Image (cartoon, rainbow, N blue to C red):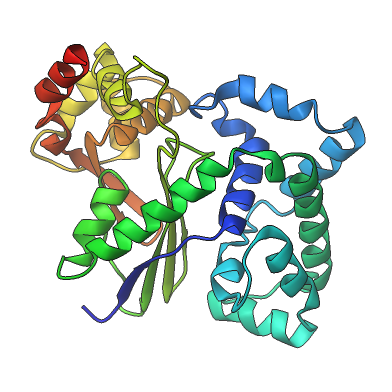
């Protein structure tokens, strides 16, 4: 293995993740925080501020801050990172951007200014007031995963953290960076570059309310409670299928199948075989190994 796997966390990652979760309307139905969270957060902003954030998101749909956060050498709190980000010269900004992409947009400095302004507003009106236990828990999660890399197959750690993603690295890959996130649960998202892969994986940073089941148990039982999802699992038994083939065999819309696959992925019931920008799916029964014990433990408490 010629590449390195590391686990990283800083508050700025979660600030950016929470903003993208808020602005990503296409995923609101899949978010465990749900549309209610989105509506509550909207109340903190004026109509003009919301419009500004949405316009930035539309105009820069492929923009991600993650490589810049990873590249920041100092304080990566929200204010610490943004001060560093704003202070980069055009040459320094170009150098970092070119490291992670084959093309650099001509409007890079303007994009930087817009992103920084949106993120400062987001931090001021929402992120700085989140429960500090979320960030503490994400930091501990990163420490725990990092310790698990010692003496363990790194891609096994990757699969465990992401609940079933298997990466088929390209020849030029140098580094995989795993980042725990809370606001976009249960989504797992990756930014893929020739030499780097950044993957943000879902982490249950806060414990369930007294007497309520753990989110992991809820995801598993919910995934198994639907006829279509059970049928998809049966299709995947013993073989790999691409998304288009699953859509064809199930006979439902792409958006519906996409939602079902998110549910199955969040429960750890499917393996996502990723190679470049293509993906296929197969059955992952590991998630079922402890289901009877999980249910028994919950009932006995």
Q: Is residue 61 above or below residue 168?
A: above
Asked where in the image residue 84 lies, by quadrant, the reply is bottom right
Asked where in the image residue 268 lies, by quadrant, the reply is top left
Left or right: 155 in relation to 274: left
Asked where in the image residue 63 lies, by quadrant, the reply is bottom right
The residue closer to the viewer here, 28 or 237, is 28
Q: Residue at x 42, y 76 (%)?
A: 195
The residue closer to the viewer here, 258 or 63, is 63
Name the image quarter holding the N terminus: bottom left
Q: Horizontal and vertical percent for residue 12?
A: 62, 58
The residue closer to the viewer here, 280 or 13, is 13
Q: Horizontal and vertical percent for residue 19?
A: 66, 44
Name the image quarter holding the C terminus: top left
Q: Horizontal and vertical percent for residue 146?
A: 31, 64
Q: Residue at x 23, y 66 (%)?
A: 154
Q: Is residue 289 above or below residue 226?
A: below
């Amino acid at each position: 293995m010629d590449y390195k796997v590391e686990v990283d966390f800083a508050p700025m990652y979660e600030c950016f993740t929470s903003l993208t979760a808020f602005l990503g309307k296409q995923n609101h139905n899949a978010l465990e925080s749900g549309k209610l969270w989105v509506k509550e957060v909207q109340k903190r902003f004026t109509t003009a501020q919301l419009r500004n954030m949405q316009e930035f998101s539309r105009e820069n749909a492929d923009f991600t801050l993650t490589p810049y956060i990873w590249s920041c050498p100092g304080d990566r709190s929200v204010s610490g990172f943004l001060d560093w980000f704003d202070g980069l010269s055009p040459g320094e900004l170009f150098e970092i951007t070119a490291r992670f992409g084959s093309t650099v947009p001509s409007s890079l400095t303007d994009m930087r200014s817009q992103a920084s302004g949106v993120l400062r507003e987001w931090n001021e009106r929402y992120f700085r007031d989140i429960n500090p236990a979320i960030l503490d828990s994400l930091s501990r999660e990163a420490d725990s995963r990092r310790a698990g890399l010692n003496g363990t197959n790194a891609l096994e750690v990757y699969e465990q953290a992401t609940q079933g993603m298997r990466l088929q690295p390209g020849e030029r890959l140098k580094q995989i960076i795993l980042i725990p996130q809370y606001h976009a649960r249960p989504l797992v998202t990756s930014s893929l570059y020739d030499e780097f892969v950044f993957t943000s994986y879902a982490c249950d940073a806060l414990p369930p309310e007294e007497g309520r089941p753990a989110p992991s148990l809820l995801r598993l039982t919910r995934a198994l409670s639907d006829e279509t999802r059970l049928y998809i699992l049966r299709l995947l038994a013993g073989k790999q299928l691409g998304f288009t083939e699953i859509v064809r065999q199930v006979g439902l819309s792409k958006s519906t199948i996409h939602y079902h696959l998110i549910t199955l992925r969040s429960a750890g019931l499917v393996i996502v075989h990723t190679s470049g920008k293509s993906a296929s799916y197969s059955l992952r029964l590991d998630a079922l190994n402890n289901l009877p014990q999980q249910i028994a433990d919950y009932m006995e408490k």
